[in-house]
Image (cartoon, rainbow, N blue to C red):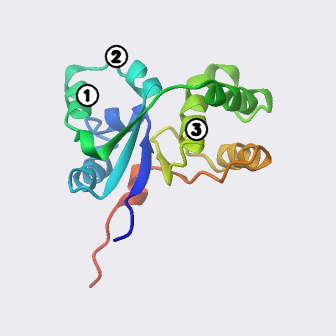
Amino acid sequence: MKSKQRIYIDTSVFGGYFDEEFKEYTIALFERIKDSEFTILYSTVTQDELENAPEKVKELVKSLRVELTEFIDLTVEAVDLATVYISEKVVGQTSFADCLHIALATINNADFLVSWNFKHIVNIERIRGYNSINIRNGYKQLEIRSPREFEKYEDN
């Protein structure tokens, strides 16, 4: 049996579950998660960002099955890598938390980082920037996608 893909979900995806614009694809992704198709990487950065989230978003987080979730602590290595993304101007200083998500997903060998943040994360120029830094620093490229790209298409 092949091992499950490990996906790092950033904060925007949890909020997207309840957002008119994003919920169709987000709910579909969470159905696949509930069906044990993935291992979810959940970080202290995401946890901190969700501290002031609406109760329904917190309930969604609590609904993730513990055995399908890998909890990731913030490390000096992740802070250092995120700092390089900023110093190399992939994004500006105000996007440091976004950089921490990318760094944590990279260092923890996520198969995918999933986000609805098109400005700072799911953006072809930014993805190239993050990955060129990752490769230069001895990490593998990170696949960065939106939940929409996890839609399942049935074969006819």
- Cβ atoms at labels 2 and 3 below 8 Å apart: no
**Residue 87 spot, x, y in % from top left:** 79, 27
Q: Quadrant of residue 54?
A: top left
**To which residue does mark 3 refer?**
102
Q: Quadrant of residue 57?
A: top left
**Residue 32 spot, x, y in % from top left:** 26, 56
Is residue 47 visible in this depiction of the protein?
yes
Q: Earlier in the sequence, mark 1 or mark 3?
A: 1
Q: Earlier in the sequence, mark 2 or mark 1?
A: 2
**Residue 17 spot, x, y in % from top left:** 28, 39
Which residue corresponds to the image point at 77% horizontal and 31% vertical from the top-left?
A: 89
Measure how far apart labels 1 and 3 are at the Cα level: 22 Å
Is residue 120 visible in this depiction of the protein?
no
Instruction: Name the amino acid, label 1.
Output: Val
Callout 3 crowding tier (Cα within 10 Å): few <14, some 14–19, many ≥20: many
Which residue corresponds to the image point at 60% horizontal and 36% vertical from the top-left?
A: 103
In this view, the residue in front, 99 or 116, is 99
Instruction: Name the amino acid, label 3.
Output: Ile
Q: Viewed as shown, does residue 92 lie left or right of 1?
A: right
Q: Is residue 38 above or below residue 54?
A: below
Residue 57, which numbered label? 1
Callout 2 crowding tier (Cα within 10 Å): few <14, some 14–19, many ≥20: few
**To which residue does mark 2 refer?**
51
Instruction: Name the amino acid, label 2.
Output: Glu
Q: Earlier in the sequence, mark 2 or mark 3?
A: 2
Measure how far apart labels 2 and 3 are at the Cα level: 20 Å
